[in-house]
Image (cartoon, rainbow, N blue to C red):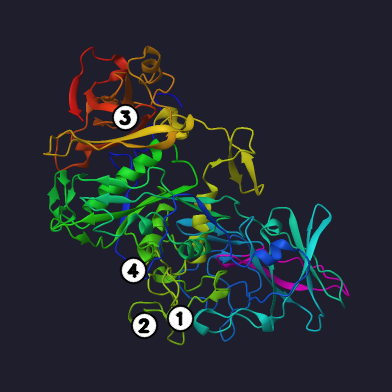
Amino acid sequence: MGNGERPPARRPDSSGSPPPAADAPAASNHPFSSHDTKHMTSRRLASRTAVAASLSALMLAACGGDDSANAPTAGGAAPLTPAVASPAGPTGSTPGSTPGATTAPAPSSTSAGQLSVDKMAFAQTHVVPSGGLSWTLPNASASLRPISRRDALVLVAIGQADAVQPVLEAWKDGAKLGALALSPPSALPPTESGGRAYANDRWSAVVPAAWMVPGVSFSVSASNYTSSVAQAPVFGTDADVQLTILPFYLFGADDTNSPPLSTTQAPDAATQQEIFAKWPTAELKVRTHPAGRFSLATVVVGPRADRTGAAQPAYPVTALDQQKDGYGVMSAMLTLITNMRTANGDGPLNDQYYAPLIALNSNGQFANLGGGLGGVGSGAAVGDHRYTGIFIHEQGHAFGLNHAGDEYAKGAYPYAGGSLSGSVWGYDPNHREFLDVLVPTTASSYAKCASSHQLDAQGRCYKQDPMQGGAGDQSSGYKFATFSDYNTGRMQAWIASRVLADPASSTGYSKWDSAAQARAPYTPTTDNNGLYGVNQNLPVQAGVPVHTIVVSFSKAGSAGASYIYPPFSYTGNLIATFDPTSAADRQAITVDKGTYPWYCKGTGCDYTLRVTYADGSRTYRVLQGGFRAWWTPTVYDANATNPLSGSSFRVWAINVPGDKRIGKIELLDTPMVWNGMPANPTVLLSR
């Protein structure tokens, strides 16, 4: 792009963080078992062992159906392709297709004596047809495909009622991978809370993850019929998701006066399995951040409105009840962890960050947080330590989901009021049961749901999506409500968009190619001439000792708002940054002329971090972004000194080499540093 072209849109706020969504969903108080490991754990679907160990035929109970009951009359959208025959709904419901969603038609060239397969679907997070689901809405589109490399319950509707001993066969490149005996419809698992059966005509088997890969096709044969026409599922990404937990103990909170680290540093094993059951990923890897707990005595809240709606300047907080609105501390911490995630090179990766906030009030008592915040699409969220409704909702924001009711009103969500009215059914492999789109009788919301939920023709309540007050719609024994198929498809899209650290790739990275249904080698590039960093802020050194330094700064001089946080030291990553004492580095970031001509063009490069190590050595790093007018890095923003404006406040996070102990951290005033480093810069802050 030429330097005279129109500048790209500015990111939403002065700290570079995505806009948070504030929430306080109801959260149940399920007890947690102790979980004190800091090592990464992985969760795959339950009930895999027997099938994965032997790919021979076996009988497995399952439940069937490839779409849901009771299609609503509102919220539909024009299909992407011509509609196919309406799939059968659950027993006792009116059959119908999902509004706005289309499925690929099954092959139909059955010959005499050949078994016919009317429907084939795969139950993972949801029951999804082999060709996937897709939606085109007035202001959004999405798709949901079977998840590659993840166990699935295959559901088959057979055209012949007299088929004897039907068998599912898996083929790839002309070779037979194996066969599985299909369990009869009478052996289907139940629906949650003893609810209505999903279908009465589906044969089933658990397909191992090794068969759920692009290029594999499935056919069904019987002892009295030849094999059906094969169906090759259209797969979604095979990427895993890493969930990184960063527990923050604030204002004197510790293990003696608050929930201990052993219960906050990661969800317990059962909760991890339920998270995996809800997220469309091939594998869930959960780790506690390598730094362990983060303890902070002070948090700086940026300019924002107080509880009355009056604008307030940035201010420091040393107890949770000092915040001037209910989300002040959460907002500050969301900005902090989002910037820390970027500084560690995790920004483009398939890594979700969650920070449980453990805080004390001014009386020294543990304080209930009462909600959470997630940066929409940022991969980061904050909330309480219980890992229930707040957690799953805020991580939904981190996946890029907004509030479903608002999106429905804007033509960006297909089901009325943010409900599941029209979604396909869900499936939970841990309980081995289907998840109805209707509120189950054991849900805490069941008794009074009619006043707040969408209703079917019989007056029964549809579930709400977790992104629209769905907490409480889940059956007893579950922590999380059921996402709609549409929102699950959007989460799958977020995962597919991520860069994957991939040792099998020639570049060390790969990305999912949806058209090819395969990973492709990915070479990091610098977008927008370095406006948001170099090589997408991926690591230039990985697995090395680092110090993470976080600085808040008020250009307006708000009392106590300019602050250097205690550094965090751990084994992490370093991204490309620049040393202003190096002429070559200054040339690289010179506005409109350097190697990265837009690195400083957005809002300037006017501040430098100087770190003096215990041995007297020093390192200097330019802090990208400041208080300049957008795209005019020589002129200050009109609100740069307005204490009530977010344009007067910034939070930077940067990793520096951590092989030596830090002696001093200083923030230096270095205006337009690409033009030259001052010989004796003014020290603005010191720690």
Q: Earlier in the sequence, mark 1 or mark 3?
A: 1
Q: Amino acid at mark 2?
A: Ala
State whether residue 161 is above or below residue 555: below
Mark 3: secondary structure: loop
The amino acid marked with disc number 4 is Ala
Q: CA distance from mark 1 to mark 3?
A: 54 Å
Disc number for residue 440: 1
Element under disc 2: helix
Q: Residues within 10 Å of mark 1 (few under 14, many from 20)?
A: many
Q: For mark 4, does the 10 Å Cα neighbourhood hold few (<14), some (14 to 19), or many (20 or more) residues?
A: some
Q: Position of residue 490 (x, y in %)?
A: 49, 56
Of callouts 3 and 2, the N-terminal one: 2
- Is residue 104 highlighted in magenta? yes
> Residue farthest to the left?
559
Badge 4 marks a residue whose secondary structure is loop
Pair 2/1: label in front:
1
Q: Which residue is mark 3?
A: 631
Residue 27 tag number: 4
Between residue 321 and residue 117, name the one nearer to us.
321
**Which mark is first along the chain, 1 or 2?**
1
- Residue named by callout 2: 450
- Decide if residue 623 is in sight here: yes
In this view, the mark in front (4 or 1): 4
Q: Tally the marks.
A: 4
Q: Are dots 1 and 3 in contact, CB under 8 Å?
A: no
